[in-house]
Image: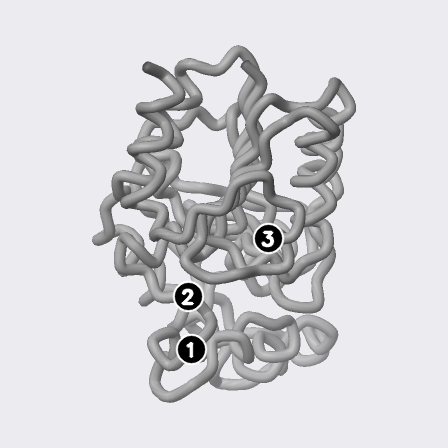
Amino acid sequence: MRVFIITGAGVSAESGIPTFRGKDGYWRNLDPAKLATPEAFERDPKLVWEWYRERRQRIRSAQPNSAHEAIAKLAQHADEFLLITQNVDDLHRRAGLANEQMVQIHGDIFVTRCSRCDFQFRRAGRGGSPEPPGARAVQPQSGRLKSIAPTSENDVNLPRCPGCNALMRPGVVWFGEQLDSRKVESVENFLRRGSCDLVFVVGTTAVFGYIIDWAVQAAGRKGQLIEVNPEETPISQFATRLVREPAAIALPRIVDDLIN
């Protein structure tokens, strides 16, 4: 059995992690969609880091729900399996999914990377830290970082790269940025090996074209394309089965039926 799954923010929302859409996602009366941009980081990196630190802490306090657990269970019974998640949290990993079984297409919130060079790190285990190992906050030197962020007092206590001294940033894909080409290639390599018996699209608004493209390609002509979402989305018209329930309710039942 070959299985391909795409998950979105709705899955994490059921563990108490707010989505970017709607008033529940607002932080200090600010729209997260306007904080998660390169322009916001350039304008006020301190504010952006404050938001990400709080979001990291909220994720650390959250627990995988029964949808995460059902997906991990299905992976154990599949001959070939790949999860594409738009979520930057670590809940799929904590539910037991191996790194090689998943692609975090929008990045990992617990990765901290340089805004200029290739340096990055992820603290092992649950959670992470915004400070690179052995690094310290450095007073910016005039002119060196003008293409990265404003040189101001707001920069002084922000994490900096131990190699090039540029500001460090969360290892996520912000609005307006390109996806990581290596991650895209790993998804497409999986799809090139053939269509899948089961394709799940779970808890995503499917507003990005590549989500629809990957799901439809994965299902091919004979595969089942199952959408699990309380709301209709652009992927609904392509689905062979629509499940209008929250993922944490629907997925455990569906997975048990498939396995048994």
Pick whichever of labels 3 and 1 is earlier in the sequence: 1
- Residue 164 lies in what quarter of the image? bottom right
Numbered disc total: 3
Residue 93 in percent (x, y) is at: 38, 34
Res. 137 in view = yes
Q: What element carries label 2?
A: loop
161 horizontally vs 68: left or right: right
Give the percent coordinates (x, y) of residue 175. Answer: 64, 67
Indicate left or right for 99 with 214 as reference. Answer: left
Q: How far apart are marks 3 and 1 (CA)?
A: 21 Å
Give whichever of 86, 233 is nearer the camera.
233
Q: How crowded is mark 2: few (under 14 residues within 10 Å), some or many (20 or more)?
A: some
- Element type at marker 1? loop
Q: Mark 2 points at which residue?
A: 19
Is residue 110 among the parts visible in the rendering?
no
Whole-number angstrom distance, CA of label 3 to CA of label 2 = 20 Å
Callout 1 touching callout 2 (CB < 8 Å)? yes
Decide which of 201, 155 is in the foreground and name it: 201
**Which quarter of the rendered picture does the C terminus lie within?**
top left
